[in-house]
Image (cartoon, rainbow, N blue to C red):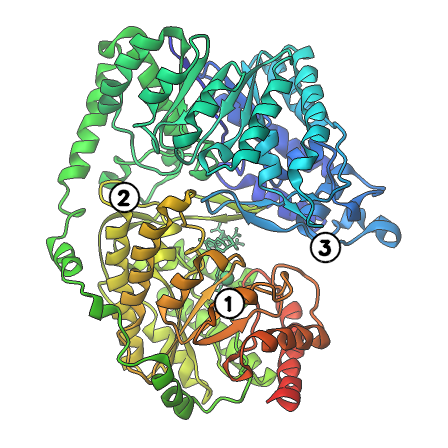
């Protein structure tokens, strides 16, 4: 008999209940008891959804982030939040958000606001975790209370559970050393706490623990390989069975290591690495369980159940009861329930599966393996019919689009002249001062904007009334920027629900959901649009808004687009053609938009590629292939313009060094980037490569509620000027301002503009 299990379930709730509960608590509008109760309700709901499984996860629920949960479990809190006198949960939110909650204001004098923990992407996903901070003196001390509480809840409910924790090697690998010390030196201090945790769980009747080590799908040097051996040899004496879980990629050269670690079972991602499975079985000691992730936990298409069974049945024969099946990774990365959708096209809906539907698919596979396919014949037939309809659909395949992509030449992605030749033409036209100031695009998405859009979508507000509200908002943004004295203005993106979904809604080949929310960080969610077919742009998407904004000012108004790579990486994309093909289709659509903006007289166009770095494969050996088509897609979208049109791009992350050459090849006239937190260190990369074009190193950390001072920003820019010639520098924030409030934004930008003036006086 095959065993079914799940690695993790979305915790945000089918209606984003957790988001609203958290934000209400943070605003002081509900109590900690109400928030805790909401947590219990969501966990109960999730276990109910997973009732058919042989083993359901416990510990996957989180009020903010599972990595931060692990840090608390390990008693590993940043120095600055120790000695907090209030509720542990308030302290947890202090690490997550930097701010104290109203409930913790009682302690304002002794221990209120602190710097937020750094956030970064969880492997190659759009989910952000709070980075563990290590120093040479880091100590760990077990606090299993959260896990034990949730375990008791599950047990009281009669759920057959499997606690889920982040494994020790991955935990060290995804953290950062704050003092340059080697985080692996902490392993001997960390492992006893893990051992104690596992024995504590065993004492509560736990048989299996899922220990997540996705680091095993990355390239590991000898020290990290050794760390895996050390860790699991030490933990093997614990009284639980360990299911070592890997996902998001391929084990490749780590297969031998993974197969031979002294654990009771191994989970592998059979979506990303089907070819690796048989060789792995040959390596796997005969007593071990092999869990195969056969349902895609990162995408929303129905699984081809028949094809999966064709592949699985012989393995089930071979492995017998040692075979477990599951989704490939935690279902955190997909929406909760397809059944919530009332407005999706019925045919497209029939091709999809969200978290609940994926568990149903898993059940069908298990039934077929355990009792024969006839036991689930109707389900298999329905599944085949849906897949057939998708494959044959004329809406998916548009020969004209495929033809256009096949005709793309290298020249399509080349500017007329080099940067050196076009820069003076742009300067003559734009007449900007030295150290020109600009922002990254969005201004605060106020409750009124969101309410208006929600009313519009629900039919409570008609199109012209909606347009009027958005235009008023754009007008406000323009007025504010003029009053501040910014040089290149933006319209503020009021009309956009999200920088990717907005474009998905307007492109043919895309569908979008009403409730398909996926957690991005904390209470923030995204609703990735669904790229199901060949992409066509039926009409201009941003021109009217931009034209309106430009009509309000004589300053240059920056056109604002999202680039093809970012649209691709933040969408659910088709699995029936290479990503590169979908990306080039998007590139052609954005190119048309760029050319239309230029035609409309827009002289500066920004094409955001915020997700270019995140899409980088987890293994370096695969980087070049990705970067080649990603950069080419950007070039196709951007570089059809005349010399006089200035192209900007924006990237909001700080680890560029490895891919600097590719960034330069994009050939944008100006790149704005994140640097404020890293103290301009990032610019070393630009310096080394001597990035040839203009750079706006972000001087204002928009993720923090702290007000940046003029002096701080001047100092950062002076550092920048040591690495990049002053005449090629811009002054701007790190990223868009949509998550901030106007009262925070105005004073911060005042300081920024003042900083630019000081720089002009001193350096220009
Ligand atoms: N796709 C994507 N990925 C990204 C980013 C990004 O901007 N987009 N930025 C980086 C950081 N990630 C972020 C992710 C989300 C948000 C964010 O603000 N999300 C919003 C939702 C944005 C949205 O789509 N809003 C919709 C729907 C609004 C809504 O919920 N309306 C309510 C009613 C109105 C209200 O909320 O009061 C309803 O319909 O019921 C809109 O504006 O139209 C949120 O969680 O609150 C910010 C940063 C990295 N990854
Ligand atoms: Zn950004």
| Left or right placement of residue 404 versus residue 685 in this view | left
Most distant residue in the front direction: 222
Specify the quadrant of the image occupied by residue 751: bottom right
Q: Residue at x 64, y 24 (%)?
A: 150
* Residues at marks 2 and 3, CA–CA distance in whole angstroms: 40 Å
Q: Tell me where residue 152 appears, x and y as whole percent.
A: 66, 18
What is the number of callouts on the image? 3
> Where's residue 586, x and y in %?
27, 58
Q: Which residue is mark 2?
A: 574
Sequence-wise, the earlier of marks 3 and 1 is: 3
Task: In the rendered structure, find residue 115 and report the number of the disc placed on it.
Answer: 3
In space, the residues marked 2 and 1 are separated at their CA atoms by 38 Å
Gap in angstroms between the C-alphas marked 3 and 1: 31 Å
Read off the residue under disc 1: 688
Instruction: Please report the residue visible at 76 percent of the width from the left and 30 percent of the height from the top.
Output: 141
As helix, strand or loop, the secondary structure at mark 3 comes to loop
SS for dot 1 = helix
As drawn, is 419 to the left or to the right of 86? left
Left or right: residue 744 versus residue 458 is right
Q: Is residue 184 visible?
A: yes
Horizontally, is 588 left or right of 254 in the view? left
């Amino acid at each position: 008999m095959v065993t079914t299990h799940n690695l993790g379930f979305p915790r945000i709730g089918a209606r984003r209940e957790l988001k609203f509960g958290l934000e209400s608590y943070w605003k002081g509008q509900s109590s900690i008891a109400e928030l805790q109760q909401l947590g219990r309700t969501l966990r109960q709901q999730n276990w109910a959804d997973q009732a058919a499984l042989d083993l359901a996860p416990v510990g996957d629920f989180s009020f903010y982030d599972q990595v931060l949960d692990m840090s608390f479990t390990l008693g590993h809190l940043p120095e600055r939040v120790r000695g907090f006198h209030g509720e542990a949960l308030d302290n947890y939110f202090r690490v997550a958000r930097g701010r104290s909650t109203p409930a913790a204001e009682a302690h304002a004098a002794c221990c209120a606001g602190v710097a937020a923990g750094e956030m970064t992407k969880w492997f190659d996903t759009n989910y952000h975790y709070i980075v563990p901070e290590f120093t040479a003196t880091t100590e760990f001390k077990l606090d299993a209370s959260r896990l034990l509480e949730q375990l008791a809840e599950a047990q009281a409910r009669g759920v057959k559970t499997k606690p889920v924790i982040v494994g020790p090697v991955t935990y060290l690998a995804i953290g950062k050393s704050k003092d340059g010390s080697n985080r692996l030196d902490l392993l001997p201090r960390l492992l006893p706490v893990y051992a104690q945790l596992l024995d504590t769980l065993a004492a509560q009747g736990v048989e299996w623990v899922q220990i997540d080590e996705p680091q095993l799908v990355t390239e590991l040097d000898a020290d990290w390989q050794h760390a895996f051996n050390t860790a699991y040899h030490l933990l093997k004496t614990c009284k639980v069975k360990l299911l070592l879980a890997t996902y998001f990629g391929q084990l490749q050269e780590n297969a031998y290591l993974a197969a031979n670690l002294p654990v009771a079972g191994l989970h592998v991602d059979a979506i990303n690495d089907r070819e690796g499975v048989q060789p792995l079985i040959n390596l796997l000691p005969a007593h071990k369980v092999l869990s195969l992730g056969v349902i895609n936990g990162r995408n929303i298409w129905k699984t081809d159940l028949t094809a999966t069974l064709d592949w699985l049945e012989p393995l089930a024969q071979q492995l017998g009861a040692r075979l477990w099946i599951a989704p490939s990774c935690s279902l955190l990365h997909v929406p909760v329930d397809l059944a919530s959708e009332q407005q999706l096209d019925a045919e497209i809906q029939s091709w999809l599966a969200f978290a609940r539907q994926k568990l149903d698919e898993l059940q069908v596979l298990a039934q077929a393996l355990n009792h024969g396919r006839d036991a689930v014949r109707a389900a298999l037939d329905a599944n085949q019919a849906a897949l057939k309809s998708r494959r044959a659909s004329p809406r998916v395949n548009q020969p004209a689009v495929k033809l256009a992509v096949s005709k793309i030449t290298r020249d399509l992605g080349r500017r007329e002249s080099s940067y050196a030749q076009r820069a003076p033409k742009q300067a003559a036209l734009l007449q900007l001062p030295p150290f020109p100031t600009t922002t990254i695009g969005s201004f605060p998405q106020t409750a009124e904007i969101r309410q208006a859009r929600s009313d519009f979508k629900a039919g409570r507000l008609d199109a012209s009334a909606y347009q009027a509200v958005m235009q008023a908002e754009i007008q406000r943004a323009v007025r504010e920027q003029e009053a501040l004295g910014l040089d290149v203005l933006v319209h503020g993106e009021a009309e956009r629900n999200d920088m990717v979904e907005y474009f998905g809604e307007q492109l043919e080949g895309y569908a979008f959901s009403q409730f398909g929310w996926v957690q991005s960080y904390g209470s923030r969610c995204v609703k990735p649009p669904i790229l199901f077919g060949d992409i066509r742009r039926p009409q201009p998407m941003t021109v009217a808004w931009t034209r309106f904004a430009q009509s309000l000012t004589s300053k240059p108004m920056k056109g604002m687009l999202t680039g093809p790579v970012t649209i691709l990486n933040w969408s659910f994309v088709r699995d029936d053609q290479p990503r590169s093909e979908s990306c080039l289709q998007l590139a052609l659509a954005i190119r048309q938009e760029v050319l239309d903006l230029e035609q409309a007289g827009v002289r500066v166009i920004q094409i955001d590629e915020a997700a270019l770095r995140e899409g980088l494969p987890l293994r370096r050996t695969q980087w070049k292939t990705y970067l080649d088509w990603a950069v080419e897609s950007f070039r196709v979208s951007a570089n059809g313009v005349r010399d006089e049109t200035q192209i900007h791009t924006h990237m909001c992350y700080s680890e560029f060094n490895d891919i600097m050459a590719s960034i330069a090849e994009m050939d944008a006239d100006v790149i704005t980037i994140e640097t404020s937190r890293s103290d301009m260190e990032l610019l070393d990369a630009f310096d080394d490569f001597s990035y040839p074009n203009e750079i706006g190193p972000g001087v204002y950390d928009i993720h923090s509620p702290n007000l940046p001072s003029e002096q701080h920003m001047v100092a950062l820019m002076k550092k920048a000027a040591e690495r990049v010639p002053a005449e090629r520098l811009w002054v701007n924030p790190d990223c868009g301002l949509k998550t901030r409030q106007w009262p925070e934004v105005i004073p911060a930008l005042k300081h920024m503009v003042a900083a630019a003036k000081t720089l002009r006086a001193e350096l220009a």
